[in-house]
Image (cartoon, grey):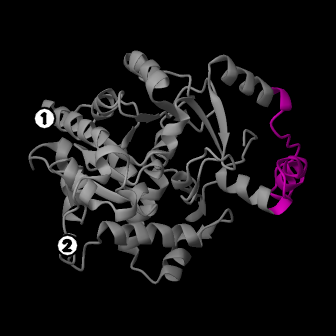
Amino acid sequence: MRSHRVGIATFYRLLSEHGTAGDALLALPEVARAAGVERYAPCPEGVARAELRAGRDRGARLLAVTDPEYPDHLRSIPDPPPLLWVVGEASLLARPSIAIVGARNASSLGLRMARALATDLGKAGFAVVSGLARGIDTVAHAATLGTGTLAVTAGGVDVMYPAENTRLAEDIGKAGLRLSENPMGMVPQARHFPRRNRIISGLAQAVVVIEAAAKSGSIITARAALDQGREVLAVPGHPFDARASGCNMLIRDGARLVRSAEDVIEALPPMTGHGTGAAAELPLAPPPEPPAAPPRDRRSLRETAALHQQILDRLGPSPLAEDQLIRDLGAAAHDVSPVLVDLELEGRITRQAGGLLSKSA
């Protein structure tokens, strides 16, 4: 997994084709040569051993996707991280979880809503998942230190980012759980955050968005949740507040409107609404009326997620012309092009010269 040009898709393909990690490592130079890469060398064993030592020195544990403690919910997503570094209470990975995400520059009302939702969901037996960012994430974690909180970091699990949340991160490592798929010591970069977001949604039964701009990391998390078959919910905001534009857009396109923790719990399928404590006791309301069908010229969230998956299913490591992809999909170019841009920004596809597209490793 630490070898050059080995992404998650390549990792699973190599294991499938070669059976064991040892055999896959032996085969890597030849695989690289077939792809046109000469003089390829896998990650040196010393580098891997140094990472393992660094993890032990910092009190972290390494979970592989095959380990019994690896969360089933996360294992079920299309691209589960093969390796997870964890610090803290790994037993929280087995708890029913709700993700709460939102703006870094949240308003006082948004922070109050995040605190109230997180507190009530914690009391109802749910662990709260977020990304340890400023604003909404910070409040959600702080409110659930005593009931169960999971912080998914974009850099190494031992890198406290942002620095202002160092104390909170240390507290989570004692009372909750910090986790990351990245190597120890890695400083987070912009490209790491979209990948981090799909773990946040993958760990949760539902994602609640509080104050998010139309183009923000929280909306990327919501899209990842839809791709993974999770519920997406949003807290509405004032139309003049840019921080609420993404939430209002999600609600317009079919996301459940959230006023309280009860709204979140009611949206969960019955089998995932049975957490510990009061979660099993809260009465579930009758299912809501289905939202009105969207206008023909606007896709719903689930239709967009379906188009995402159709595109990813048709792309592989070998480049494909964009116009050929559009013909294969049988869709209009003006419908597909914005979705391709979204997938490119999320790092899930790569655009190459000559209008060629390929699936990112």
* Residue range of the region highlighted in magenta in the rendering: 17-46
356 over 72 or under it: above or below: below
* Residue 32 seen anywhere in this rendered image of the structure: yes
Residue under the point 55% across and 35% down: 90
206 over 290 or under it: above or below: above
Judging depth in this view, the residue of 156 and 56 nearest the camera is 56
Q: Position of residue 217 (x, y in %)?
A: 37, 44
Separation (CA) of disc 2 from disc 1: 27 Å
**Residue 33 is inside the magenta segment:** yes
Q: Please, what secondary structure does the residue beneath circle 1 have? A: helix
Residue under the point 25% across and 53% down: 264
* Residue 163 seen anywhere in this rendered image of the structure: no
Task: Say the numbered circle drawn on residue 74.
Answer: none
Q: Please, what secondary structure does the residue beneath circle 2 have? A: loop
Q: Position of residue 111 (x, y in %)?
A: 20, 32
User: Magenta span: helix, strand or loop, mainly?
Assistant: helix
Residue under the point 71% across and 56% down: 12
Contact between marks 2 and 1 (CB within 8 A): the answer is no
7 over 303 or under it: above or below: above
- Quadrant of the frame with the N terminus: top right
Image-quadrant location for residue 171: top left
Q: Position of residue 137 (x, y in %)?
A: 33, 34
79 over 180 or under it: above or below: below
> What type is the residue that disc 1 sits on?
Leu
Residue under the point 55% across and 25% down: 187
Q: Is residue 270 left or right of residue 180?
A: left
Q: Position of residue 221 (x, y in %)?
A: 39, 49
Q: Which residue is mark 2?
A: 291
Judging depth in this view, the residue of 325 and 84 nearest the camera is 84
> What type is the residue that disc 2 sits on?
Pro
Task: Say the numbered circle drawn on residue 109.
Answer: 1
